[in-house]
Image (cartoon, grey):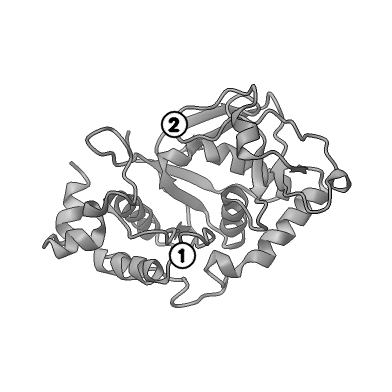
Amino acid sequence: MTPSAIPPAPYRGRIAPSPTGYLHFGHARTFWTAWQRARAAGGKVILRNDDLDRDRVRPEFISGFIEDLKWFGIDWDEGPDIGGPRRPYSQSERLGLYANSLARLREGGFVYPCTCSRRDIATSLAAPHAGEEEPLYAGTCRGRRLEAIPVGKRFCWRFQVPDGEEIVFEDGGFRTQRAVAGRDFGDFVVWRHEGLPAYQLACVVDDALMEITEVVRGEDLLLSTSRQILLYRALGWGTPAFHHCPLVRDEQGLRLAKRHAALALRELRAAGHTPEEIRRSMTR
């Protein structure tokens, strides 16, 4: 793939680590690409702390990613450690903004309450997607009204996709992308049963309100982009440009994850590797 053109100024890019483990080589390569594109455009870099996974987030991982990013040579203009005009920069402090957006989706008729459990979905007739993609939801709760849910019954809010509509966007890394709603992805969760926003909604709200002009992230989120485009449209917001980066994979072809502790930046640093050496290895 040849490098894509960088969107015109004023460019605002973001780096959004999730503090559920220490940053590894794969994170570093994607974040370095995001940083380079922002700086090449003379733009701003916004650091966001995506800390909504309460079961796995740890304070040491938050301080850890700030330390590791700085050591690696990445700086930023706004973030949880330095503030900025679009604060707060930690998702756990932005719950009211997500709730407001959910209310707008409800008012517009874009979402419905869903009581299906993961087991219900897994055993439905809808075919699951390969890899890490969620199963295609069968629409069991479509048309359900909130008043019809028994008191105390757990439920989430799902976005109803326009079945049969082709979502098309130009990606900076992977060129023209197409996905058909209802075939390649189904109705998706925007608000979880435990009272927190799901990734798709939180990401769209943050990127829109922080005025991000280009989203740089891993190729595993290509299909999520189609979902998010529908959310941008439903909420009446413009869509940023997207640039997805190839994933770093291990010897078995699996994408790097936080289980690959030996490739954590702090482990590489402890082994004597320098940021320059690591960055050079990214181009091989």
Looking at the picture, which amino acid does disc 2 mark? Answer: Gly
Q: Please, is residue 153 above or below residue 133 in the view? A: below
Question: Residue at the spot x=67%, y=27% of the render?
Answer: 165
Question: Residue at the spot x=83%, y=52% of the render?
Answer: 151
Is 157 on the left-hand or right-hand side of 36? right
Disc 2: CA contacts within 10 A as few (<14), some (14-19) or many (>=20): few
The Cα–Cα distance between marks 1 and 2, rounded to whole angstroms, is 30 Å
Image coords of residue 41 (percent x, y): 40, 57
Looking at the picture, which amino acid does disc 1 mark? Answer: Ile
Is 85 on the left-hand or right-hand side of 25? right
Image coords of residue 250 (percent x, y): 25, 39
Is 127 on the left-hand or right-hand side of 214? right
Where, quadrant-wise, is the N terminus in this rendering?
A: top left
Numbered label attached to residue 46: 1
Residue 132 in view of the camera = yes
Q: Secondary structure at mark 1?
A: strand
Numbered label attached to residue 257: none
Which residue lies under the disc numbered 2?
131
Q: Please, is residue 136 above or below residue 99 in the view? A: above
